[in-house]
Image (cartoon, grey):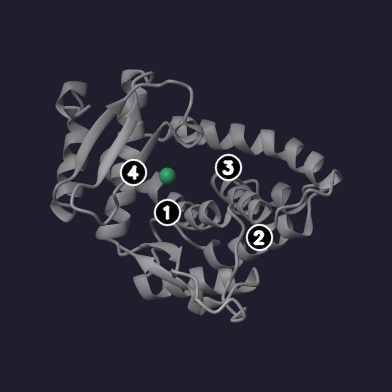
Amino acid sequence: MSFDIGSLGSGELIQLFDEASSCVPGLAVEIVRDQGLSHDIEKTTAILVGIGGPIPTIRFLDSLEREERIEAIAHELAHLVLIHRFGLRLIRQKHPYPADPKQDSFTRMSHNGFSLLGQIGNTAHHLILIDYLREQHGIGSYMQCRLLHRHFLSFAYQSYMLAKEAREDTESFYREGIIAFEYGKIFRRLDGVRNMPRQTDSFQKAVRAAETYFGKYGLQSLPTPPSYEEDVLSLLKDLGYERKDFVFFP
Ligand SMILES: [Zn+2]
């Protein structure tokens, strides 16, 4: 259902919305019922759909309180500003897969590859976005940081269990490593993350790669679009993928 952001009575949010719509025409905001079903939206409380399409849409859960709604919508608007104004685009695999199954140089990812690629773009954005919202729009990211903290705590235990059961799925450990780096950087606890006990090699490799390429990212040290894309591709290369198999969008 379409949502009027004016009803939240936040001048800061309207200003940000105007800024985002000036580079993303057709932008829409929708409120959706929280049925406790959608895993992704639960973790993030809001999502962006149709990026690069005619009607890019921000969807957020109706269970959020007023302050949380402002934060959740602002967060997604800031992602759009970073993509469209700062030129920090998202990444996906080139597709379709080559018809020839013997052409095995093409990067194969597990079904979790999609969320790994999404996470790489998200993490690079978040290192800039939280300061951008606070300094340029006076909007906090308390809920976002709380969710990140909670995710990190539950992961530390889960990954240990998974590794112990030898059910390692490389892409999900890479993804957790990227999130752990984000947590360490935002909460200034990188030392702790680097030295987390009992983690898998994949996890540690991803933490190191993210730190190498995104370690300096921030609102005061914005990457240029070409250097950002180079960083993302180099990170993927360090994780064992072929640079040529990825494209940026929109
Ligand atoms: Zn985000």
Mark 3, mark 2: which one is toward the viewer? Answer: 2
Q: Which mark is residue 7?
A: none
Task: Pick the quarter of the image with the N terminus.
Answer: top left
Query: SS of the residue at dot 4?
Result: strand
Horizontal side of residue 199 vs 86, given as left or right: right
Q: Which mark is residue 187?
A: 3
Of the numbered discs 2 and 4, the one sitting upstream in the chain is: 4
Question: What residue sits right under mark 1 in the picture?
Answer: 125
Query: SS of the residue at dot 1?
Result: helix
Q: Position of residue 87 (x, y in %)?
A: 30, 65
Q: Which mark is residue 48?
A: 4
Of the numbered discs 1 and 4, the one sitting upstream in the chain is: 4
Do residues under tags 1 and 4 come within 8 Å of each other at their CB atoms? no
Up/down of 24 relative to 240, above or below: above
Spatial distance from mark 4 to mark 3, Cα to Cα? 25 Å
Of the numbered discs 4 and 3, the one sitting upstream in the chain is: 4
Which amino acid lies under the numbered mark 2 shown in the image of this protein?
A: Ala
Q: Which mark is residue 206?
A: 2
